[in-house]
Amino acid sequence: MIKACLFDLFGTVVSDAKCSKNAPEQAMPASRDESLDALSDTGAITGLTPGEVRDRVYENTKAFFEYDGAQMPDMILPGALDFVKELHRNGIRLASTSTRCHPDKVLSSIGLYGLFDYIVDPKEVAGRPDPEALLKAANHLGVAVEDCVAIESTPEGLQAAKAAGIRSVAVGDLSVLYDANMGVTSLKSFTLLQLKDGIEGRKSC
């Protein structure tokens, strides 16, 4: 019986943001002293030294990524809002198991924060294909893994679900997302009844 749905938000509920726990470091040069000459004109205008400009740019970039690029409601993928709300109305426990960015801020920005029973902190778990995030969510919700469904959009996410012993729904390009219990190209028009029809009775992962 399906009692909980565990969402990797990116690629399922919101468009796939190109960020990770190390996004600010990936976006900026490794050293704050690197290429300071390129900032000399900006320093002349602002009155700051090149090093101070560099630090200011770094902190602003870090803040941008920490807020996940200010995700807005128009970033919600087709059908995701209706599907999540239907699950909530029918007593299905909901968890975010995303291991990138700040899922709490993403959910807040699209008005779904209050519907989720648990949000895994990306800083406290290993990234996919490690199943840690999924297992932690199931444990926190008090739901057995056989009663959970992982909603995933990457091959690594499906590998994590299999490792956790959790049945999965692949969302996206099914030519590469084939290692799932069922698959849909998007959550548009997808319903709880279809989820149950596709998952119930399929105990193997």
Image (spheres, grey):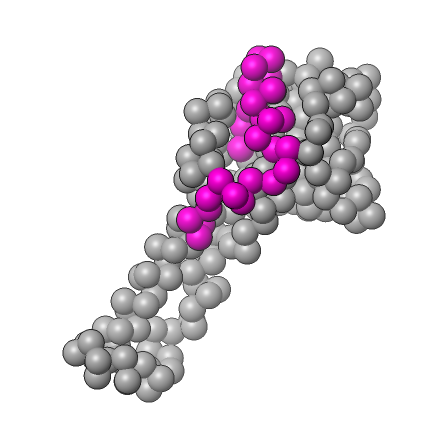
Q: Would you say residue 120 is visible in this rendering?
A: yes
Query: In x, y percent, where is residue 140?
Result: 50, 23
Q: Report the front residue among 198 and 162.
A: 198
Q: Which portion, as a residue range, is magenta?
A: 68-96
The answer to whether residue 74 is magenta is yes
Who's the residue at 70% across and 23% down the image?
Answer: 191
Q: Report the front residue among 65 and 145.
A: 65
Q: Report the front residue among 39 and 82.
A: 82
The answer to whether residue 192 is magenta is no
Quadrant the C terminus occupies: top right
Query: In x, y percent, where is residue 95?
Result: 54, 28
Quadrant the N terminus occupies: top right
Query: In x, y percent, where is residue 104?
Result: 43, 36
- Relative horizontal placement of residue 24, taking residue 39 as reference (left or right): right
- Relative horizontal placement of residue 10, taking residue 41 as reference (left or right): right
Whether 92 is drawn above or below 71: the answer is above
Q: What is the residue that sits farthest to the left in this orientation? A: 47
Q: In which quarter of the image is residue 34?
A: bottom left
Whether 116 is drawn above or below 133: the answer is above
Who's the residue at 47% across and 58% down the image?
Answer: 23
Q: Report the front residue among 130 and 19.
A: 19
Who's the residue at 44% across and 52% down the image?
Answer: 69
- Relative horizontal placement of residue 50, taking residue 84 as reference (left or right): left
Q: Would you say residue 130 is visible in this rendering?
A: no
Q: In which quarter of the image is residue 11?
A: top right
- Relative horizontal placement of residue 42, taking residue 196 as reference (left or right): left
Query: In x, y percent, where is residue 131?
Result: 63, 37
Who's the residue at 34% across and 66% down the image?
Answer: 58
